[in-house]
Every structure is written in structure tokens, then in C-alpha cells.
């Protein structure tokens, strides 16, 4: 009985007391966060080939510039503006609902002087912007966000100067695509918007947010014109004092493209085929580079991904599941209590080897399957307590058990020490009296 109580106290120390220390001690905070990130990466890697699910029909396509196409263009450092216009026109002609252009449009293709390609792309986009709303998709272009001297961010593009493209009134919308990079250089999340100091705008919505809103409006049967108006309302509300959302980075449910329902087709392959006139009807089409020379490639928990793929996965996450949320309420309480009892019993096993083996077995048979099941439903299970149980509790368990199981011995030793001190003190008093 005493051993079971000792194990219960040891587990309570980790499962109940340690989490309460979060935010107070750097060592505890770092171990808790590292445990969560590690477990999250393991679950994501285990689910990368499983269907994303969610029960919502999302039409999401990537029109890519792959190695073959990039080589045929002469492997330019900056994507030719004429080619970008062609790809946008292709998606628009096949009735895409929205086209996200994942190319840097902050500078001209000649690094200064505007070429005919620059001017042609600008003229074409202006025509698209002024076209009837029901005849054109929403075209989402990306700002180039840079660090400003005052510590904020600025946004610029040669397309915005002296142009009607400088606002969000027509079919052209401006957005950001910044993904926060973690300390280990991996990308796991995306922002709803970016805060900038430019043109009196404080917040620029992310392309992922605008594309997600467009997809949701189309799924609810709104027309192209009405969907765009709803996006404009959202952009306007983001400049108010009370934002409709906070800018907490949202986790991306990273899967392989086929598992997320993301269709990836190189541009040149589609141009050689006879397609249905409404091939992209209702689709969110992302245009971006997916070739070996691009700088837009990032490390993730499931390997390197191109920027356009990360955008697609972020959109799929939001449309299919909404925000990836932690498990809350009574299920967490029940989970913690069960874990408390189970791990208390495990810690009673003789020897650290047997404790680690049984703990790992329980994690493989219970914790991992449960985490994967919840992940498929857009929920996360906090992995910090069971991992901290091994990382923190194990070294201190012998001392805790020794203290609990040997209280009487400790009392005896303390009494002996007190008696010994009294004896010595009385002896010194007698010597001083003499």
C-alpha cells in the first residue's frame, strides 16, 4: 500500500504540480514545450499518408512550375512576368474560384527597369481587376514583407505604384504568406495576418485566410461577387480596433498532397491536354514554383515542402477542420486521472529498465493510437505529462519513495540526532559549571 501511495505521489508531482509551474521556470517551460513539439511531430509523421478527412468537399489545386518547365524557360532567377500572366489566364479561363499567385512581385524581372513583361502583367491584372465580378476569379497576390527601420514590417510591389491595383476594390486582393519559423528552423504554423507599417494599413491578411474564406463562401452557395464582397468586409474589419481574430500562429495539419486532396499538376502538362471548359470550376488554384532551384522550400515535420504546398496545406487544414484545437474539458480530466493511476502502477515495477519498457509499450498501444484518432478530428492531446513523467519524475522517484516509505526511519534518525545534541549540550553545561 505504501509503495502504491509513493507512486501516486510521484505521478501527482509531475502530472499536477509540474504543469502549474508552466510560465514560472524556464527549464520546466522548455521541457514542456519540447515534449509537446516532439510528440506533435511524431503524430504528424505517422498520419502524413492518411486521408485528411473532415467531411467537407474542398477543391484545391496547385498549378506548378516544375523542373522541366523551369528548364524550358532558361532557368531564370526571377519567374518571367509574361509566364505568370499566362498561368493566371489559364486558371481564370477554366473557371477557378480563386487564384493564389505565390511569386515574388515586389520587383521587376530586370531588377529595376520595368520590362515589357512587367508592363504586360500589370496591364493584364488591371483588366482582371476591372472585369465583372461574376466573370473573374478572386486573384490573390502576395506582398513582399520586409523589416522596417522602426522594427515593424513594410510591404511593397512595383505593381502597386501608380495603379488601381493598390486597393482591394475589384477582383485583385493583396495578402501575405509569411510562415513563422520555429527555433529548430521547421515550419509548423501559419499566421492569419501580418502587422505592417505601410499606407496606413496595420494588418495584411494572409493568402491562406483569404483563400479559406473564399472556399467556405463558395461551399455555402455564395456567388463569386458575393464571396469577394465578404472577403472585402473581412479585410476592412481587420483594420479596426477590435479584430475578428487574434494573430496566434495556427498549426498546419501537414499531410502528403494526395492525402490532403490537393491536386498537383505541372502547368505544361495541362496545356498539352484537352480539358473540360470548366476544369477548375469551384477550385482554389495556387500557382507557384516546385523546382529544384527555387529558394521557396522549407523544412517541416514530414520533410521539405515548397511554399506553395505549405499554403495549400494551411488552406486544407482550415477548410476541413478549422483551427487545430487541444482536447479540453472533462475528457482531459478523465485522461489525466487515468494516466495518473496507470503510471503510478508502472512506477512500482522493479528497476528503471522495466519501467521504461512498460511505459513505452503503453504509449505505443494507448497514447499514440488515441493521439492519432484525435488528430484526424482536428484535436491534439497534450503529450507533455507522460513524457515529463519519464524526463523529470524518474530521477527523483527514488528519493520520493525513500521519503514516503521510510518516514519512521527518518523520525528515528532525527530523534537520535536530537538526543545526541541534547547530550552534548548538557555535557558542555556541566563542564562550564565546574
Image (cartoon, rainbow, N blue to C red):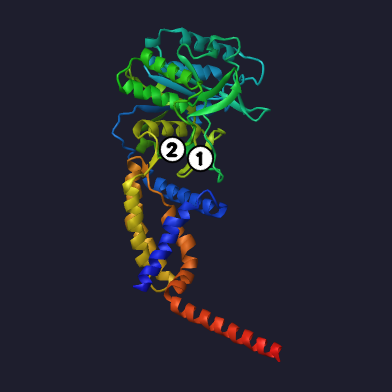
Numbered tag placed on residue 165 in the rendering = none
* Image x and y of residue 35, in percent: 47, 52
Residue 387 visible in the snapshot: no
202 or 369, which is in the foreground?
202
Question: Mark 2 falls on what kind of element?
Answer: loop
Return the residue found at the far left: 55
Kindly identify which residue carries mark 1.
Answer: 187
Above or below, 3 against 188 in this view is below
Residue 362 horizontal/vertical position (percent): 34, 60
Residue at (47%, 48%) from the top-left corner?
A: 37
Classed neighbour count for the residue bearing mark 1: other residues with Cα under 10 Å, few (<14), some (14–19), many (≥20): many
Residue contact between numbered discs 1 and 2, judged by CB atoms under 8 Å: yes
Q: Tell me the quarter of the image containing the C terminus.
A: bottom right
What secondary structure is marked by label 1? loop
Q: CA distance from mark 1 to mark 2?
A: 9 Å
* Quarter holding residue 273: top left
Residues packed near mark 2 inside 10 Å, few (<14), some (14 to 19) or many (20 plus): many
N-term mark: 1 or 2:
1
Q: Please name the residue shown 50% across and 50% down the image.
A: 22
Name the spot of residue 256 as percent of width and height, x first: 40, 39
Residue ID for mark 2: 252
Amino acid at each position: 500500500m505504501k509503495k502504491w501511495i509513493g507512486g501516486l505521489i510521484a505521478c501527482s508531482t509531475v502530472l499536477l504540480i509540474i504543469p502549474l509551474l508552466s510560465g514560472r521556470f524556464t527549464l520546466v517551460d522548455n521541457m514542456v514545450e519540447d515534449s509537446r513539439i516532439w510528440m506533435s511531430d511524431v503524430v504528424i509523421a505517422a498520419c502524413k499518408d492518411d486521408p485528411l478527412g473532415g467531411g467537407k468537399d474542398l477543391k484545391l489545386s496547385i498549378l506548378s512550375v516544375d523542373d522541366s518547365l523551369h528548364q524550358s524557360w532558361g532557368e531564370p532567377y526571377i519567374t518571367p512576368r509574361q509566364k505568370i500572366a499566362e498561368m493566371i489566364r489559364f486558371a481564370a479561363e477554366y473557371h477557378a474560384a480563386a487564384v493564389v499567385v505565390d511569386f515574388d512581385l515586389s520587383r521587376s524581372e530586370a531588377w529595376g527597369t520595368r520590362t515589357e513583361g512587367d508592363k504586360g502583367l500589370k496591364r493584364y491584372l488591371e483588366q482582371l481587376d476591372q472585369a465583372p465580378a461574376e466573370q473573374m476569379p478572386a486573384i490573390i497576390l502576395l506582398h513582399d514583407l520586409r523589416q522596417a527601420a522602426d522594427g515593424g514590417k513594410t510591404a511593397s510591389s512595383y505593381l502597386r505604384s501608380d495603379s488601381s491595383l493598390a486597393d482591394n476594390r475589384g477582383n485583385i486582393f493583396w495578402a501575405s504568406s509569411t510562415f513563422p519559423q520555429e527555433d529548430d528552423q521547421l515550419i509548423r504554423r501559419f499566421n492569419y495576418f501580418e502587422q505592417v507599417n505601410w499606407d496606413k494599413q496595420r494588418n495584411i491578411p494572409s493568402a491562406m485566410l483569404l483563400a479559406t474564406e473564399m472556399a467556405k463562401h463558395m461551399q455555402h452557395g455564395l456567388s463569386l461577387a458575393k464571396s469577394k464582397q465578404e472577403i472585402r468586409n473581412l479585410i476592412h474589419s481587420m483594420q479596426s480596433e477590435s479584430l475578428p481574430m487574434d494573430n496566434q500562429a495556427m498549426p498546419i495539419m501537414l499531410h502528403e498532397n494526395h492525402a490532403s486532396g490537393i491536386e498537383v499538376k505541372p502547368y505544361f502538362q495541362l496545356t498539352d491536354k484537352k480539358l473540360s471548359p470548366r476544369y477548375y470550376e469551384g477550385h482554389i488554384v495556387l500557382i507557384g514554383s516546385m523546382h529544384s532551384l527555387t529558394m521557396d522550400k522549407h523544412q517541416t515535420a514530414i520533410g521539405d515542402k515548397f511554399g506553395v504546398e505549405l499554403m495549400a496545406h494551411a488552406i486544407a487544414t482550415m477548410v476541413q477542420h478549422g483551427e487545430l484545437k487541444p482536447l479540453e474539458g472533462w475528457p482531459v480530466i478523465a485522461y489525466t486521472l487515468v494516466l495518473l493511476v496507470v503510471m503510478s502502477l508502472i512506477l512500482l515495477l522493479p528497476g528503471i529498465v522495466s519501467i521504461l519498457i512498460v511505459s513505452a509499450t503503453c504509449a505505443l498501444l494507448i497514447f499514440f493510437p488515441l493521439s492519432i484518432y484525435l488528430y484526424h478530428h482536428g484535436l491534439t492531446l497534450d503529450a507533455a505529462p507522460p513524457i515529463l513523467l519519464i524526463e523529470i519524475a524518474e530521477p527523483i522517484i527514488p528519493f520520493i519513495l525513500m521519503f514516503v516509505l521510510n518516514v519512521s526511519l527518518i523520525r528515528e534518525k532525527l530523534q537520535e540526532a536530537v538526543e545526541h545534541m541534547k547530550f552534548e549540550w548538557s555535557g558542555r553545561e556541566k563542564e562550564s559549571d565546574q
